[in-house]
Structure formats: C-alpha cells, structure tokens
Amino acid sequence: MSSVVQTSYEKKIALESESLRQQRVWSNYLRARASVFSMMDEWVSIQEEGVSDYWRQEIKGFEYLFDASPLIVKNLREHCYHITGIKPYEYRAHHGHAIGNYQWKYERLKALDRSNLFVPEADALGGFGFPLSSGLANIDTLKFYEVMIGLDRVGFLDPFNTLSARPAVLEIGSGWGGFAYTFKKKFSAATYICVDLPPTLLFSATYLATLFPDARCLIYGEKGFDSGLETIEDYDFVFIPHFKFDLINQIKIDLALNMVSFQEMTQLQVDSYVRMLRKYSCSRLYSLNRDRSKHNQQINSVTEIIADHYKTEIVELLDLQYVNLKPLKTPKVVTTPFDYRHVAGRLR
C-alpha cells in the first residue's frame, strides 16, 4: 500500500493557508459570507425578477468566491475583474510602457482638482496599478478621482467638509468597495452606505472591513441590524442588499451616487432607485454612466430617468471619456447614448 508524500511546496502552501486563517481578513470574509448567504436565502424567497440579464450572468461568474480559500481571499482585489473588467495582468511590469498614459491622464485631472482629492490604490489584498508620481493607480483609481473632482465641482462635497454632524453617503452599486475606500480616506467622519446585489457585497464588506480595521460595520442579515439603523451615525460602513433599498427611509442621505452600473440595469430598476431617493428627500444625486450600455436592451436613458425626478446638470470635466488614457486626435464630445457623462441631480 503506497502513501502520498507531501512535497515541500505543498507544506509551504498549507502553512501559509493556516497562517492566513488566523488573520483579520479571513474573519472579515467569513463574517461577510455568512451575511451574504442569509441575504441570498431571502432574495431567492421573494423571487425577484427585476435584475437585468446582464447582471444575472455576471454574478454567476464569481460564485466560486462563496467557497474561497484563504489564499484567494488574501488577493481578493485581483478577483474584482468580475465587477469592473480590470485585471491585474494589465498592470504587470512588462506593461510598464503604458505608465506614461496613466501619468498624463492623472496630470490632466490634477489640473482640475482644487481640493487635493486623489487617493491612490491601496496595495492591500492584491491591490495593483502603475506607480505614478502620487501613488499606485489604475483605471478604477482615476475614475474615482474624476468623480471626486466632479462632486467637488458642483458643491456636493460641501456637507462632508463640516464636523457639525456625521453626514451619510449612499452608493448604489458599490461594487468591490473601491470608491467607498476613496471617499472614506478623504472624509473619515462620513457614514458610507453600500447597496448592491448580495453576492457583490461579499467583495465590499470584506475589503472595507480589512482596509479600515477600526471601522464599525453594520451588515444586513446580522443580529442587531435593525437597532443599528436607529443609530446609523455610530457606523462607518453599512451594507444593504438591493432588495431592501427601502430601508433608506430611516436614514438621512446627504448624497447618493452611482458609477457605471445604472447603465447595466433595467429601466424599472433605475427609475425605482431614483424615485425612492426623491421620495425620501435625498437632496443630491450624482451619476457617471452611459445612458445605456450597448449590450443592455432593457433601458432607454439613465439621464432622462434622473431628469424625471431631479433638476439635472451635465458636469463638464475632460474632453475624453474616463476609459481613455491618452490624448485624442479629436476631442471626444458626448453625443451618443453610449458615451459616458457626469450628471448631477438636485432635488427640485
């Protein structure tokens, strides 16, 4: 009878995995996963049909993260391509020839920045990017910087510059938590509310709890969530599944925003979100979206939906789309439903 001999490399991996199980990121992952499992049970029970076909396919792609190993969780950021499409491979050393384009884009944004709003990509959990003059950056990092500048341009950051109260910001489609990280690095006193499909909250709840180890987190599905909403100002991060969006009626929202996910939703979904924000008197709404994605036939126009409920303003920043990283021979003007636009909405 033969016995299997454990190789040295196998022992190394086993030891590293066991060590990771003792670290905070693993306990954060287990906490987030337990809550997401509870959310999934409730989501299935209500048999919701409003989620777009696009997102049903996307979340199917990362089901493996429900049973991730400590080594996968250690590099969670590298798996966020399921949400943004951005992969760490594109930022490895052999692609260093592209750094100049990122630096050029950063410099153009910096010229518009009057409030020192840049936050580099964190290198924790497998964070990646090119080393620019002000820190690590990738497409997401520059997108977040652009949105922060847009928010500042229209005065939407003003409530967060006062220490007289703890303002709340709500992000619909918070993804892996990247913009929440950016915002909290600049406005640590804010309560940041992440709303997304339950599987996606596995990313943001794990990421943010790890990057902000002293933060107080309130996660839907955990014991004490309802009472926690009554003292929302005591929390740094709140995580709510999309199907419980009406819970915002208990919270004073100073700013709501969405980046590049309204365009992937159905007409009914986006209208429902914006209508409810207006109903509960959210005074500021900011969007960076196309009117619709080319592959999404279930929506007509994000901008028109927002304009139905809010007084809107198109925010002009750069003469190129956020996905462009080098000078264009002809400046890009927003002319089609498939171009990205910054839209600021104020309550009528």
Image: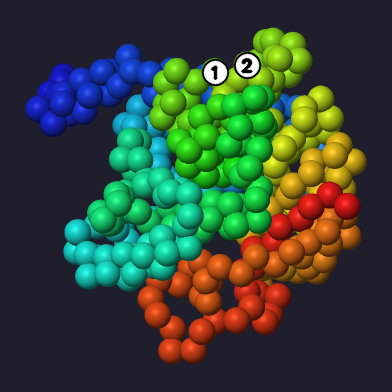
Query: x, y (%) of residue 80?
Result: 46, 46
Closer to the chain start, of discs 1 and 2, is 1
Residue under the image location 71 percent in, 57 percent down: 344
Mark 1 or mark 2, which is nearer to you? 2
Is label 2 in a helix, a strand or a loop? Answer: helix
Query: x, y (%) of residue 278?
Result: 86, 45
The crowd level at tag 2 (other Cα within 10 Å; few <14, some 14-19, many 20+) is some
Q: Residue furthest bottom?
A: 329
Query: x, y (%) of residue 296?
Result: 70, 66
The residue carrying mark 2 is: 234
The crowd level at tag 1 (other Cα within 10 Å; few <14, some 14-19, many 20+) is some
The residue carrying mark 1 is: 216
Residue under the image location 52 percent in, 44 percent down: 179
Residue under the image location 53 percent in, 77 percent down: 319
Mark 1 and mark 2 residues within 8 Å of each other at the beta carbon: yes
Residue under the image location 65 percent in, 74 percent down: 338
